[in-house]
Image (tube, rainbow, N blue to C red):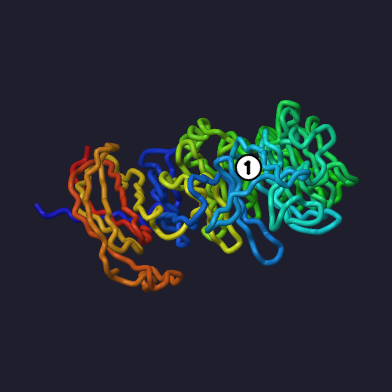
Amino acid sequence: MANKPLQAISFVSPGYFGLNNQDSGVSLNPAFATQAYNAVIDKSGRIGARKGWSYSTTSGGTSSSPSAIFEFDNSDGTYTIISAGNAKLFTGETTMTEKFVRDSTDANNLSYTISANNWQIVQAQYDSGLDVSPHAYLIQKDQATLVYHKTGTGHAHTGGYGFQRLGDVGNVPTGYTTTTFTPNCGLSAFGRLWLADIGDDRLTVYYSVLLEASNFTGIGSGFINLEQVVGGGDRVVAMAEHNNFLIIFCEKNIAIYAKADDLDNLQLQDVIVGVGCIARDSVQVIGSDIMFLSNSGIRSLGRTIQEKSLPMRDMTKNVRDQFMSIVSGENKDQIRSVYHEAEAFYLINLPGSGFTFCLDVRSFLEDGSARTTIWDTINPKAMCSTRNRRLLLGQTNGIAVYNNYQDNGDSYNFSYFTPYIDFGDASVTKILKKIIVTIVGASNTALDIKWAFDYNSNYQTYNVTTSNIPVAEYGIAEYGIAEYVSSAFIEQIKGQLSGSGNIIQIGVEALINGTQLSLQKLDIYSVVGRTI
């Protein structure tokens, strides 16, 4: 009997649609991944390993566990990192210096006690009548709003910048005191500070005097009551400014106001009913849109407006059940997110589970969903994207930077699995023969090539270590991608496979330990056996 010819199937840029664990079976588009851990979609549309992290803090950060990180603009061309965690306040990144909250009537009174770590930090310009200087405002429920500001006439500091309560440097709204004015969300926009969600007063947004962000009683200050707009059973969760609109995210609805820069003519532009935001720190402006966590997944405001009278799509559609199952068990006050333009992704961390979902925002799939991967070993408690395009992460002993390909000096696991493959005919047995895995980067990296048959999770494994000396420079004519510099290389890993079945699944796992890795192509070869 003549030898049967090899049958080949190729996955070019495998997994470039991101993770899909919502659908199943052989009908799943082969561009999806059924497992994508510690992965990103790279600039060339391939799935690859995420970067790692290393501490930038070298002193003062022991057990600081930053849960909020903010880059403060000193308005003189310099920037200061403000962070908060472990019931403490800090300034500085390399050296974290603990700061205390002072009383305006007694510069030596440092008795204010912080009892929670869910600060939101915003920055506003403040005109005291004596000086004009930048101010940062730290906001969270059941805590006095704190102000980080420069010393000056009337300020009880011995030098530099320091923290005080809002009521000690300005005027809280009528009916509140320094200690009872405890909003949970804020926004600096249109020359004012906007604060909301205060105790039982959950549908009133207070705004400051124009260019006096600490003054909530002077001429021009006031409030917006949303009870008649969204109903009394709702509450304000977050606020944003976008395209000159004031966006007020309630838990169940979204109110959009025009002309917020001219409050005499403030106009309710739109109300999106039935869709809201359930986590304050999930809101991120991503260029021309805003992303936020709703009670059914991550949404974009632009698409929500377009589709409010239609069945709505969510950006986490392909991981919806897993994602929302995890969200349901989280403390929503501790959920953090960031938009990092340099890597073109939106991260949302669910700290209780230890999972960070990474949504690629370079382009979206045809159904409006985002290419999604999961990080399961990094778990940052805070995230901040800086003006010099670094991503800062809150870790146990201080502030870390997203860089290189180790987690604080340790290796971590990258994992990708294909959808189920039937080679076009599920009724025919396939006898696996070999696989060629084309990878980019990954010098001296341990790889496990895995395979299983007929939806069985009992995988066979072929172990291999990539070359120490890359075999070919990436960017050659076969792929023609010039963006890769000479330090990135291509290698083809060839493995002999065995076994047979009707449905096949292939996985590639790698121990990332200092070098990047992206998957360029999978070529899988089999021989056709008998028909069922």
Would residue 419 appear left or right of 254 to someone viewing this image? left
- Residue 254 drawn at (x, y percent): 71, 38
Query: How busy is the neighbourhood of tag 1: few (under 14 within 10 Å), some, or many (20 plus)?
Result: many
Q: Secondary structure at mark 1?
A: loop
Would residue 511 appear left or right of 54 to someone viewing this image? left
Picture residue at 40% right of the left edge, 52% below the top? 15
Q: Circle 1 sits on which residue?
A: 119
- Residue 450 drawn at (x, y percent): 26, 47
The quarter of the rendered structure image containing the C terminus is top left
- Residue 531 drawn at (x, y percent): 21, 40
Compared with 239, 151 (above or below) is below
Would residue 465 appear left or right of 40 to someone viewing this image? left
Figure quadrant of residue 426: top left
How many numbered marks does the figure carry? 1
Compared with 324, 385 (above or below) is below
In front of the other: 501 or 497: 497
Three-letter code, disc 1: Trp
